[in-house]
Image: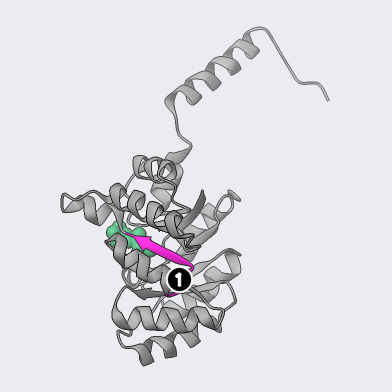
C-alpha cells in the first residue's frame, strides 16, 4: 500500500521523507491554514521534496473557478494532483482535467455511489473519509470495503485513498480492505513501525552480545 503524508507542513514532510517511505502528500485548506504560509508557496516547496503525487485542493466551488485554480496548481509540476470536492461542479472539473491528462483527487467522499461517479469522471484518486464517518457513529472502513467491491466489479482504475485516518488500526484495516493508499499524519506514520516486542528483543540481543563480548570485525 502506498503511504501519503496528510499535511501541508514542508518541514514535517522533509523530515518524514528522509525515511524513503513516503509515496506522496495530501493537503487541504485546513492543513494549509495551519502552516500560516502562502498555500501555493508551500506546495512549490513540497513539490521539491516529494516526487510522488501531491494533492492541492481548490478553494473555488464553481466549475470555472476550479479550472482556473487547477491551472495555477498544475504549473507547479506534473506530479500535482488537483483535489476537487465531490460535488456537481467538482465532478465536472474532474472529468475535464482527467481528460487533459491531469491527476485528480476527488475528496470528501462518504458513499460508494459518490465514489462510483468519481471513477466514471476519471479520478486518479478517490478520498473516502474514514475517521469523519466513525466520528458520527458510521462505519468508515465499511465504506472502503464497499468502494473496493464496486471498483473491482467494474474494473475502475481509480485508486482508493483512505483519508481522515486517525490511528494505526485505521491503516491496518484499510490495507486489509484493499485500499491503494492511506494518507496519514506524521504522528501515525511514526507509530506504524513501533512495537514493544521489537524494542524488548533488540535490548536483549544487545545485552547478550555485550555480555559475551560479541563484536563485528571488519
Ligand atoms: C486528506 O486528503 C483529507 O483532507 C484528510 O485526511 C482529512 O482528515 P481529517 O478528517 O482528520 O480532517
Along the viewing direction, whichever of 40 and 71 lies nearer the viewer: 71
Give the quarter of the image for residue 84: bottom left
State which region is magenta.
121-128
Q: Which residue is mark 1?
A: 123
Name, please, the residue furthest toward the right.
Answer: 218
Q: Looking at the image, which residue is at 56% across and 84% down?
A: 75
Q: Is residue 218 left or right of residue 161?
A: right
> Which image quarter is the C terminus in?
top right
The percent coordinates of residue 212 (x first, y second) are: 67, 7
Q: Is residue 58 left or right of residue 193?
A: left
Q: Report helix, strand or loop for mark 1.
A: loop
Along the viewing direction, whichever of 181 and 112 lies nearer the viewer: 112
Q: Is residue 48 left or right of residue 142?
A: right
Q: Residues within 10 Å of mark 1 (few under 14, many from 20)?
A: many
Name, please, the residue furthest toward the top.
Answer: 212
The scheme the figure's colours follow is: one colour
Residue 59: in sight, yes or no? no
Splitting the image into four quadrants, where does ligand 1 fall? bottom left
Along the viewing direction, whichever of 43 and 92 lies nearer the viewer: 92
The percent coordinates of residue 190 (x first, y second) are: 45, 43
Name, please, the residue furthest toward the front.
Answer: 153
Q: How many marks?
A: 1
| Residue 155 included in the magenta stretch of the image | no
The percent coordinates of residue 119 (x first, y second) are: 42, 68
Residue 44: in sight, yes or no? yes
Amino acid at each position: 500500500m502506498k503511504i501519503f503524508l496528510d499535511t501541508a507542513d514542508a518541514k514535517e514532510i522533509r523530515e518524514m521523507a528522509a525515511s524513503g517511505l513516503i509515496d506522496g502528500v495530501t493537503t487541504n485548506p485546513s492543513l494549509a491554514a495551519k502552516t500560516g504560509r502562502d498555500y501555493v508557496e508551500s506546495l512549490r516547496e513540497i513539490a521539491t521534496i516529494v516526487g510522488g503525487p501531491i494533492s492541492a485542493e481548490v478553494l473555488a466551488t464553481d466549475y470555472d473557478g476550479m479550472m482556473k485554480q487547477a491551472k495555477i496548481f498544475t504549473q507547479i509540476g506534473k506530479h500535482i494532483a488537483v483535489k476537487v470536492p465531490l460535488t456537481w461542479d467538482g465532478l465536472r472539473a474532474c472529468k475535464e482535467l482527467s481528460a487533459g491528462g491531469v491527476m485528480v483527487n476527488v475528496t470528501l467522499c462518504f458513499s460508494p455511489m459518490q465514489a462510483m461517479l468519481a471513477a466514471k469522471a476519471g479520478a486518479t484518486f478517490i478520498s473516502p473519509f474514514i475517521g469523519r464517518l466513525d466520528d458520527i457513529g458510521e462505519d468508515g472502513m465499511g465504506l472502503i470495503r464497499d468502494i473496493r467491491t464496486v471498483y473491482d466489479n467494474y474494473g475502475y482504475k481509480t485508486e482508493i485513498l483512505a483519508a481522515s485516518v486517525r490511528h494505526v488500526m485505521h491503516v491496518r484495516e484499510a490495507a486489509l480492505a484493499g485500499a491503494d493508499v492511506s494518507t496519514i499524519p506524521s504522528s501515525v506514520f511514526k507509530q506504524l513501525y513501533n512495537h514493544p516486542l521489537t524494542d524488548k528483543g533488540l535490548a536483549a540481543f544487545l545485552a547478550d552480545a555485550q555480555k559475551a563480548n560479541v563484536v563485528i570485525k571488519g
